[in-house]
Amino acid sequence: MADFNQRRTKLYNSRLIRAEVADPAFTAAQDPVTGVSAKLDVEKFVQSREFEIKEFELSKLRSRYSSATRVFQSLPRSMRRRTASHNVRRVPKRLRTRALREMGLSMKEPDGNETKGVDRQGRPSKAKHSRGRELYRLRRQEKLLRYAARLKLSGHLVDGERVNVRNVKMRAKLKALRERIQELSQSAETPLNNVCGSVDWTGINERATIGKVSTIRYISRQRDFKWLPTHVWHAKRAHMVKRWGWNIAYEPTMKCFRQTSRQSRIKGCIGFDTSFYTTIVLKGDGLGKVVEILTNGKALGKKYVQNGRIWEGFVQLDDELLCHSMVWWIKNGKECVLRIHPSVYDRIMDYLLSKRDEIEIQDSRYSIGSITVTGPQALCSLASIIHPSSEAVASQLFRQLSTLNSSAIPLGTTFSFFADDPRLWPRPTKPHTKPSDPLETIIQVQSGAGVEVCAVEALFSVEGRVASYAGQPSLKQLGRRRTPDLVGRPIPKADSDPSIPIVLVKLQCGFVLLTPWHWVLPFWHQLAHTPHFALGGLKQLAQLEFEKGELSFADCAFTRAGFVEGLAKMEELEARWAKRPKSKRVNYDKLDEPGSPFGCDWRYLQLLRQKLKQVPRVEDYSGTEFTITQERVIKNKQDVFEAIEDQKEKDRLINALGKPVFTQLPIKLVGLTQQPDTPSSRLSVVAVKFRMVNRGHPADNARIYAIPEESYLRWLEEAGKKTILGKTMPFGPECPGKEYLIGYATSATFNLAAGKGTGVGLIDAEVAYDLHTKNRHTFIVRNVASTACYLAEWTLVAV
């Protein structure tokens, strides 16, 4: 009972606001008629109000922390740690004393004796055991003993030579080993020019491979999926996925859907380690022909080849789009930098290696890394970690524009210069710039003044990258140079410290910092300490592209990599659905979903749109007929759906035999400049983005229907109606039939930037052209396993 009263008293005190009962400001007697004092002491009146305001603020704090009795519960969400309830080292230093007191512990006594449950450093004491280097040394010693025993039992000495161990003495063994060591030392590789183990892994006219891993403890983990330079940092803070031969951060451990949207638009920046993108340097006489084939001649304009502007678009091979890429001509059109997605690395490299007689290929897959930063303060954050080595024109222009919002910088803006080691600075530091006209500065940068040619040549050459590693200091060496008098100030640059060639480019995804592979981690560590910085992964990249109404990797179902990605997601969702008991899963057979309910069934859409054209104007329901090749004759709309099921069954049989079902993709992307009239087995589609006219929350894989002609006016009337409460109608009339299906929404959800449901998808190009000519930019959207339909407005996506 006492405990209950104590809690009630604590709750009462947390909500109590103290106030002065007798106000000393009114010193004179009151008027008996009006009741107003004749005199007011202003000084005491202000003091009384100050007392009440302070009590009000303290009351708010007491009420706020009355329920959060532990110190780790009052931390902001980004600073909370799972083990903070029992490990004070997971709590900020300024709050550790309070955390120890809450845990019933105390700090070190003045006499130096260890107190209850706390060691000499004030940390909770625990059992001593081997950790870190000591544990690694013991394990290595155990392995060496095992190898020695195995070698002795097998009877092998050196290079697999089998001998009788009993007849060989110890001196003979040591002599043979010394001779072998001397032989290997004479044929050793060229020594490194740094103590950090930084090497350049560039493949000249061959695929690049990692020949040496500096940390031998991690070599076995990178056999199939290589690590990015910041892998260890990301593995502690994000969920990792194995994709395209890499270990990539998928999403941060902390929930960040709203934070990502806000920081990309309002305040802050979001950083991504995009070193998994492959950079290839091409040179040679046949370079123009190769680039013409890859870009369909779009990257051969004068502004790209001669003026050095960057081209962004889809590369293609054999009349098939591959991925969104970047092409940059350098050295006055003598060399070309190609940056591609890792999903198409093998296919593009096979084509380039087949042209090695005409061009020289430098595969910089493991030689050039990149960091992508997006958000309003992206350029400001990068300027606080990039410190130019000299006062060149390019670096001065970069500093002058670093104070602008990132949205003010036009696409294709490029900076290139040499920078100092970012580890010399203890924290990110904003540069001091003189005020200048930003418009004139941008014009200068657009004319090419922001590019330092020698820095570009150094970054995209093996010799230049190796030179940037010369004398690269380790963290231990930098720690020795950071003397007590340099607290808060940068370490003076030594003559042996290298200069780093960097290239900073403004692309559609944000600012991309290209730098040598082993310099990515130092820049990333500094970037992570900039104010209002947030971590992003593949999921956040797709979210930002969705909010801007652009196509992400998963939306590009017209590419082979994107199509395979969609099939994999469909199989995963179907397997997850099949594991659930029948009473707990949706019965899609009764709902009669068009195509697979687990994703965007482009094969179904292809067959539907093509076979609907075979339906005669006067439908015949006399009976079912088949051709000599056992194909169903299309006589009415019902025969269309039966023929689709027949073809899908054939596809399943072909897949069961282990043969490829799709020798070519079922869809292809086209423009909307004219009606597609070329006959093709592939369905022509266009990319669109849409937004709900009224209410509605679309989801991924939503079905898109054309509005029937007879109910078009009714849909528009229903869209304008409102309920009694003044809200718009949640959904319109009944859903059209399956014959009106024209596409799928590849990505759709509630858009925080637009404040309503939006989506991105692909629809039939012929239907889109017909709607465009009639000036009808509306269609119907329906989620999977739902009967509610919503009216949406659509526009084309620039691809």
Image: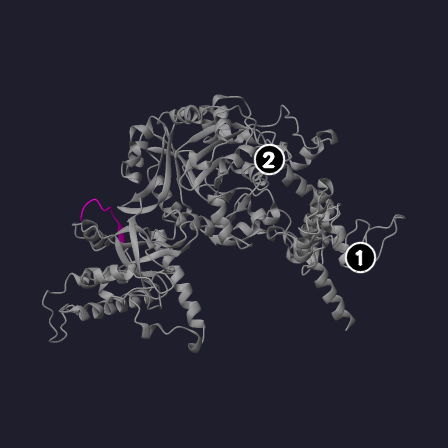
The residue sitting at the front extreme is: 33
* Element type at mark 2: loop
Q: Is residue 419 left or right of residue 304?
A: right
Any magenta on residue 682? Answer: no
Q: Which residue is mark 2?
A: 428
- The amino acid at mark 1 is Leu
The front one of 18 and 408 is: 18
Which of the 4 image quadrants contains residue 45?
top right
Q: Which residue is mark 1?
A: 105
Note whether 143 is above or below 718 in the view shown: above
The front one of 38 and 129 is: 38
Which span of residues is magenta-colored? 667-675
Q: Main secondary structure of the magenta part?
A: loop
Protein image colouring: one colour
Which of the 4 image quadrants contains residue 206?
top left
Q: Quadrant of the N terminus?
A: bottom right
- The amino acid at mark 2 is Pro
